[in-house]
Amino acid sequence: MTQPIDLQIAGLPELRDATLGDPSVVIAVIDGIVDFTHPCFEGAQVSTTVAGQDVVRHETADHGTFVASVIAGQPGTSVQGIAPQCTLMTVPAWTPEQPRPSQLELARAIETAVARGADIINISGGQYSDVPMAQDHLDRAVQLCIDHNVLLIAAAGNDGCECLHVPAALEGVLAVGSHGDTEASSFSNFHELYQRNGLSAPGENITGARAGGSLAQMSGTSAAAPIVAGCAGLLLSLARQSGSSLSPRDIGHALLTGANACESDTHQLCQRLLGRTLNIEGARQAMNQEVTSVGAEQSCGCGGHASESPSQALSFADPVPAVVQQTLETPVEAVMEPIQQSTVVTEGAEQSGHPVKDEGSFVYALGTLGFDFGTEARRDSFKQMMVPVMVGGSPVVANPYDPRQLVEHLRQRPSEARSLIWTVNLELTPIYAVEAVGPYAAEINAILVNFLADANLPISVAEFIERVSVPGVVSGRAVRLFSGQMVPVIEIDAPRGLYGWQVNRLIAEAIAALDIKPKTEAAAAAAELTATLRTFIDRVYFEVRNLGRLSADRALNFAATNAFQAAKVFSETFTNSMRLDTIEVERSPYARPDSDAWDIKLKFFDPENTRRARTVFRFTIDVSDIMPVTVGEIRSWSSSS
């Protein structure tokens, strides 16, 4: 039998004697497609988002299969993984169609893993960045992990330079570098900043599974990361089996504080090791100290862990003994390349398609409506069929990229709307492709055509559509856009809830419904309320923008589009000169059976008297159906914070 690693990690053999994992511990692998027909996975606890069983050889499948086997390869097989009895969840982000996904796609995968109950997430990939900053969606996905106590582990990259990769460089992520027998791997990235949240683990000539049933050896930080993820899974399993309340992020903190600090007099050698190396025995000791600390605080009522969640109490940015820290002074502008798998040695193969399965997931997305042709041939077919435009009395070939010409064509030939790829965009980035299905498909496509027409009216016109709301279901399919980007397809089988938001008209109707009195003050109050409502709607769209997949995000998006409800809240704050402070979303403790209810809390403060109690308005939204719905009445109370 072949071991995936040389078990020279201090304390790992003893830990494996104590536990091989617990099925309640879910380790998500965000990587390529995994070939679960490989013999090493026989008997493994698996939760996958991949449709179908057959995996044709491709380097993304080789990489994903390898990483998964290092974690979950079963005892007695050719690849004995670190944590074979933990539950393995796979969320493909690298596919043959998209071997280098964007930060948006990586964020989408992280959200999916969190929503499906992952405790630990392993990402064996990264993207070069001058600063520890990510694009908005990825940054929010990392924060989602922090908020839900999910331990996110990411490879530090294989450029062999003093440089950063995201998400490994982001605060709250456990970064993993690679080392060999005696020193850091020459290919492993390093940086002073990694010494706050990173450690090194074995990453050279690691043996693992390969798609198709064979074995392969790989070297890279992507081989080291799943070793750390597997060890984290064992530690969390041990904690749960012993009745401890330690969270996955507590385990991450224990891995850092219990690691072997580099004691070399040569600063560069320690820097290349990210300041420390993996030590399981040290991590177990750190766990015991944390359990003792929590128990003491709870028994004496001293606070600390007893009064706040571990994800808030413990931060990977906390100082760690014997680790050098330095302020990063780099321009804010970062080089944003597609996410790459962090492997040095791998082998290519023939490309193949494989759809991503995420059936039954609802979406309530906000964005602008767009369209795409997918291929040059499809674009040219539209150009060929469109009526030429008369310019100066002479016919000119139609331009299918001109929304006005395209709308006219689609109104004359309604069936052509089915050949167009409709998209929902955030800013200029497509996040979904929209497909009308079922008996109302023609009606839905006609609505989309009208939305496109109104979205290209002058901004000052009342009918101008600023954005659309799209409730639908994730189909499990993806489509390639003309740019090469792959986006998930959401299906709409009824026009219910498909709205084009004419924000000016919407606000005016909401204010009119309030019947502001006295009439002499109506104009001034209406103007102020109009500005406030627009600020609220724009704030949700631009500041709290999301993919509309998570239940909390769907509730928030629905709250932003329910201007009538928001108008009632804001009108009650005007007489007290209150202004919106924060928008909070939390699961509602009071919900109907079989519902998925969330409380939206709007907190207001007095800008002229900050010592005055804040006013909180709460309304509950049930997102258990495709179309969210408000439950009960709006409630309000005063709060000191």
Image: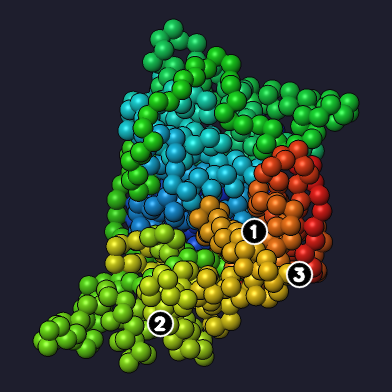
Residue that label 1 marks: 552
Residue that label 2 marks: 449
> Label 3 neighbourhood size at 10 Å, few (<14), some (14-19), many (20+)?
some
Q: Give the amino acid type for the residue marked by disc 3 in the picture.
A: Val
Picture residue at 80% right of the left edge, 33% below the top: 306
Along the horizontal axis of the image, is 124 left or right of 573? left
Q: Is residue 397 something that shows in the picture?
A: yes
Taking the view exactly as shown, the residue that stands out farthest to the front is 520
Q: Position of residue 215 (x, y in %)?
A: 40, 45
Picture residue at 48% right of the left edge, 89% below the top: 443
Determine the secondary structure under disc 2: helix
Picture residue at 89% right of the left edge, 26% below the top: 300
Position of 281 relative to 99 (above/below): above
Residue 362, located in which quarter of the rendered image?
bottom right
Q: Position of residue 515 (x, y in %)?
A: 71, 74
Question: Distance between the Cα atoms at labels 1 and 2?
Answer: 30 Å
Q: Position of residue 152 (x, y in %)?
A: 55, 41
> Label 1 neighbourhood size at 10 Å, few (<14), some (14-19), many (20+)?
many
Q: Is residue 213 something that shows in the picture?
A: no
